[in-house]
Image: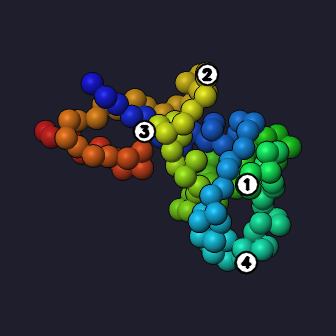
Amino acid sequence: MASYYQCQRCTACCRIPGFVRLRTEEIAPIAAHLNISVEHFTQKYCELLPSRAGLTLTSRADHSCIFLEGNSCRIHAVKPEQCRGFPNTWNFPGWRTMCRAKEVPIIQNQLCSPETPLHTED
């Protein structure tokens, strides 16, 4: 049976070293959510990827995401696709040791996404 992982918002994925790549179309909605210009957003919260192939969100010295506040995401409503998809659309070796996402079976012929709770028949 197929399954997906339902995020428990433990924020462990927001604290690991790495890059949160931004797609061009994600930048303006995040800037608008923060009520700042795209230019201000990119100058304050973005860095060029080492490959120079795009932008990434900046990280704090402890490797946590710049938008992580306690156990909440300041931009949750408009967070990048990379964040929304973890661990279902991407993950890394050993992710299960730090992530608290719950494995949930997908009911045949039912479409769902990591952001959508499952509806089961009683």
Amino acid found under the numbered disc labelled 3: Gln
Number of residues whose C-alpha sits closer than 10 Å to that of mark 4, classed few (under 14), some (14–19) or many (20 or more): some
Q: Quadrant of the N terminus?
A: top left
Q: Residue at x 72, y 74 (%)?
A: 38
Amino acid found under the numbered disc labelled 1: Gly
Which one is earlier in the sequence, the residue at label 4 or at label 2? Answer: 4
Is residue 92 rendered to the left or right of residue 19? left
Mark yes or no: residue 75 visible.
no
Mark 3, residue position: 6
Instruction: From the top left corner, tell me how far across and down residue 69 is, in percent.
Output: 69, 53
* Marking on residue 37: 4
Mark yes or no: residue 6 visible.
yes
Can you tell which of label 1 and label 3 is closer to the viewer? Answer: 1
Please determine whether, in this image, residue 89 is positioned above or below residue 25. above
Quadrant assignment, res 43: bottom right
* Marking on residue 54: 1
Q: Residue at x 59, y 55 (%)?
A: 80
* Marking on residue 94: 2
Q: Nearer the viewer, residue 49 or 43?
A: 49
Q: Disc 3 on helix, strand or loop?
A: strand
